[in-house]
Image (cartoon, rainbow, N blue to C red):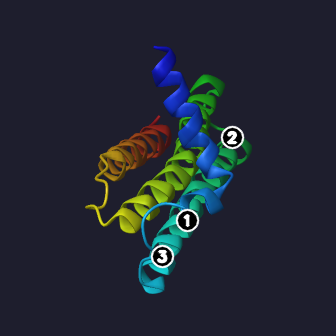
């Protein structure tokens, strides 16, 4: 248990000290590092969109019952926060793998995010349709 906490703390420490990542392995072709950075920024944009969508749901959908509105907003904001954390973690993991000459790490997060966003879209569509019918 203590080792797991130490390993997690070490991994999080790399998020704030990217120069430590450069001490590993050899420098990859800069184009790969820049592509990794662009992917990181795309995930941050997705994160910001989810957080913004959560605040928009809470602020502009006053016709929804408060518990429904707050639930939708919280799911979107938490999803955005998870997306941001995942982005920096994946950036570091990919950068380290490239420097070490390893395969890039795989992640189930994109599939999970797609399912959550699709579920939220269907829920909001049902709320809109049922709200107009009722």
Which is nearer the N-term, disc 3 or disc 2?
3
Looking at the image, residue 15 sits to the left or right of residue 7; the answer is: right
| Mark seen at residue 51 | none
Say which element carries label 2: helix
User: Residue 41, located in which quarter of the rendered image?
Assistant: bottom right
Q: What is the C-alpha distance between the residues marked 3 and 2?
A: 38 Å
Residue 16: x and y in percent read 68, 51
Say which element carries label 3: helix
**Mark 1 packing: few (<14 Cα in 10 Å), some, or many (20+)?**
few
Query: Residue at left 51%, top 49%?
Result: 89
Say which element carries label 1: loop
Looking at the image, residue 5 sits to the left or right of residue 121; the answer is: right
Looking at the image, residue 23 sits to the left or right of residue 4; the answer is: right
Residue 21: x and y in percent read 55, 59
Q: What is the C-alpha distance between the residues marked 1 and 3?
A: 11 Å
Query: Residue at left 44%, top 59%?
Result: 96
| Mark seen at residue 22 | 1
* Residue bearing mark 2: 58
Query: Residue at left 30%, top 49%?
Result: 111
Q: Which numbered disc, 1 or 3, marks the residue closer to the eye? A: 1
CB atoms of marks 1 and 3 within 8 Å: no
Query: Residue at left 68%, top 50%?
Result: 56
Which is nearer the N-term, disc 1 or disc 2?
1
**Mark 2 packing: few (<14 Cα in 10 Å), some, or many (20+)?**
some
Residue 62: x and y in percent read 69, 39
* Residue bearing mark 3: 33
Q: In front: 83, or 17? A: 17
């Amino acid at each position: 248990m203590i080792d797991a906490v130490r390993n997690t703390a070490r991994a999080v420490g790399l998020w704030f000290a990217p120069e430590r990542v450069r001490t590993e392995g050899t420098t990859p072709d800069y184009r790969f590092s820049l592509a990794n950075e662009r992917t990181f920024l795309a995930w941050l944009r997705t994160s910001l969109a989810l957080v913004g969508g959560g605040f928009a749901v809470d602020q502009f959908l006053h016709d929804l019952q408060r518990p429904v509105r707050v639930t939708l907003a919280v799911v979107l904001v938490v999803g955005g926060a998870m997306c941001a954390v995942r982005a920096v973690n994946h950036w570091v993991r990919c950068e380290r793998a490239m420097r070490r000459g390893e395969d890039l790490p795989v992640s189930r997060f994109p599939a999970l995010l797609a399912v959550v966003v699709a579920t939220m879209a269907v829920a909001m569509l049902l709320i809109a349709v049922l709200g107009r019918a009722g």
